[in-house]
Image (cartoon, rainbow, N blue to C red):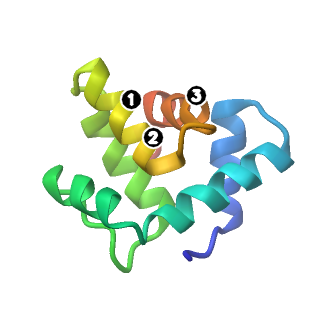
Amino acid sequence: MMDINQEVFNEFAKVTKESGEQIGAALKSISERLDYEPLKTALGNLNIEYENRELLDIFEDLSKVYKTMSEDSRVELAIKLGGKYNLARTSTILNSLNIK
């Protein structure tokens, strides 16, 4: 599982406007899913490098690609990334994230 630093947490809190508990649970789920083959395959298909990178950097790259995808593809990717329970959070983050 990937370490989640304060910068990631703060950026997600700013974007989602949710409680720390909700953000923490979502980030934990997302970081655990980065080891799942379906997500690795999806990221590879999008030319997103995910190994040995900070979570915030991965999300920044994903956010750029996400905005160009069809709605069905967005939903599928958000579910692979955050799970069905975190679909709305993950979609909000990917639609809103604007870092650097």
Q: Amino acid at mark 1?
A: Val
Kindly indicate the quadrant of the structure image that contains residue 39. Answer: bottom left
Task: Please give the name of the residue rendered at 74% of the width and 53% of the height, measured from the top-left corner.
Answer: 25
Disc 3 to disc 2: CB gap under 8 Å: no
The numbered dot on residue 61 is none
| Label 3 vs label 2, nearer the camera | 2
Disc 3 to disc 1: CB gap under 8 Å: no
The numbered dot on residue 88 is 3
Q: Earlier in the sequence, mark 3 or mark 2?
A: 2
| Most distant residue in the bottom direction | 52
Task: Please give the name of the residue rendered at 69% of the width and 36% of the height, measured from the top-left corner.
Answer: 14
Residue of label 2: 79
* 28 with respect to 87 (left or right): right
Q: Is residue 57 above or below residue 54?
A: above
Disc 2 to disc 1: CB gap under 8 Å: yes
* 63 with respect to 82 (left or right): left
Q: Disc 3 versus disc 1: distance between alpha carbons?
A: 9 Å
Q: x, y (%) of residue 17? A: 75, 30
Q: x, y (%) of residue 48? A: 24, 58
Q: Disc 2 versus disc 1: distance between alpha carbons?
A: 6 Å
Q: Earlier in the sequence, mark 3 or mark 1?
A: 1
Asked which secondary structure carries label 1, the reply is: helix
Task: Please give the name of the residue rendered at 66% of the width and 61% of the height, measured from the top-left corner.
Answer: 28
Q: Nearer the viewer, residue 100 or 82?
A: 82
* 11 with respect to 30 (left or right): right
Marks counted in the figure total 3
Kindly indicate the quadrant of the structure image that contains residue 51. Answer: bottom left
Q: Amino acid at mark 3?
A: Ala
The numbered dot on residue 75 is 1
Q: Disc 3 versus disc 2: distance between alpha carbons?
A: 9 Å
Q: Amino acid at mark 2?
A: Ile
